[in-house]
Image: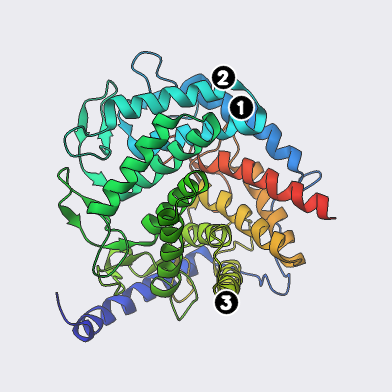
Amino acid sequence: MEPYERQETRYGLARTLWASYGRARAARVRLSGDWRSGRRTPAPPALHNPLDPERYRRHLATSLLPFWSEHSIDTEFGGFLHCLDRQGRVFDTAKVAAMQGRMIYGFTRGYEVLGDGDYLDIASRGARFLADHMWDREAGGWFHKVTRNGKPILSQKRLFDHAYVLFGLSTYARASGDLAVLERAVEAYEQLERHAWDQTHGGYYERCDRDWSVSSSDKTIIVHLDMLEGIRELAEITHQREHTARVEELTGLVMSRMRDERTGCFLEHFYRDWRYHPVRTRDVIRVGQNLKAIQLLRLARGSDDRQESAKAAAGREIMDFCLEHAWDHRHGGLFQFVTRNGSISSAEKLWWTMCDGILALLTLCAGEEDARYRQCAAELEAFAFTRFVDPEFGEWYTSCRRDGLPLDTRKGGIGKAAYHTVQLCVDALALLSVSEGRT
């Protein structure tokens, strides 16, 4: 590996070129307006009764869970078929561990909010499929991808997968009281601690081979945020000091190692020793990960008041950057990819950026009264529910053009399942209900 100074010189020209490219893309997008002063061009019309908690309950009950329960359940082999087109037709039968975990989470939370026991039964089938077909009985851990009937296609151990299976199984174990599922979740977590935790520099590696030899020692913000989410959920059940301590340590690493001093945002890719690795992302900030970080850092509460104050300040700084540089002042909504100099890298808008944006804004509103954040939450809600929600077949499109016209109308895929939209409804319902009670 090259010395840090030599790498900085080597990548300096590349970063300059990427920044120029970002400015050129931004010129094509032609952003206008200033969110601080309120000068914005017209966006989608406001929804009737904006930020109504019942909107999220209804959406969960009448659009999201009915779509997934009708189309995703594999009644023949078990688990979930998560690659679905706009109408719910299956276009790929392969099953990815992370998406199985997300589906388990989605149906479990549906049961908790709506009280429909059928949803918990559906989640239990997903947990059985994972245990029967996606657990590596030789080396431990979860296979990345299997065929519809459970034969391994890719046997790598990816930390992204393990994070979401941990999160899904922990959520299900909490709701169902299933101790066998909880034991498997703990066993999988302990495999990660033995093989995927960097004992020298701290943090989790990105990927291991089937035998747990490290195949990518890079550190990514998405893995660390997702692991933080999964371990926090596990700690809520076990109350084990080792689990809560890992949550605190991960929070500290994310805050101290992965934030950009220039923008205040979290960067995506790092070498094993936490040096920033700009090549993998072309020096682009991924907005959705930063919006998710705002929520998770508030939830991962520790005993250090100074760290809590620092996390709150970081959340506001990140949100202000996103509203300044990623907010579309012409059509509404948030862009996902922004260069570190604040230029838009792509005009495509993704469903999950909208979900995490609404929740991040509501999270900040819950911590302090800020009319700016609440107004932006209402505007983002209007954009999401009028541009991404499919009124005919249910659920959300994967992506839209800048003006809100659907670009990718698929409802599920390798990275999309009943997670972001369900989590939006469940958490927004809770945040808005608390807010109503306070007022």
The x, y position of residue 304, in whole percent, is 55, 72
**Residue 372: x, y in percent?**
73, 66
Q: Residue at x 38, y 39 (%)?
A: 185
Indicate whether 212 appears above or below 258.
above
Mark yes or no: residue 391 visible: no
For mark 1, what is the residue?
392
What whole-number distance in Å separates the C-alpha atoms at marks 3 and 1?
49 Å
Q: Secondary structure at mark 3?
A: helix
Closer mark to the observer between disc 3 and disc 1: 3
Amino acid type of disc 2? Answer: Asp
Label drawn at residue 118: 2
Q: Is residue 404 above or below residue 147?
A: below
Q: At numbered mark 1, what does the secondary structure look like: helix, strand or loop?
A: loop
Q: Nearer the viewer, residue 383 or 169?
A: 169
Instruction: Please provide percent x and percent y for residue 18.
Output: 34, 72
Residue occupying the point 22% across, 34% down: 136
Residue at mark 2 to residue at mark 1: CA–CA distance: 24 Å
Give me the residue at 41% from left, 59% from top.
246
Q: Work out whether mark 3 precedes mark 1 in sequence or the reverse, and give the earlier one.
A: 3
Seen in the picture, residue 98 relative to 284 is either above or below; the reply is above
Disc 1 residue type (three-letter): Glu
Q: Residues within 10 Å of mark 3 (few under 14, many from 20)?
A: few
| Residue 332 placement, left or right of 216 | right
For this view, does 261 lie left or right of residue 367?
Answer: left
Considering the image in quadrants, where does the N terminus appear?
Answer: bottom left
What's the mark number on residue 306? 3
Which residue occupies the foreground of this view, 282 or 256? 256
Q: Amino acid at mark 3?
A: Arg
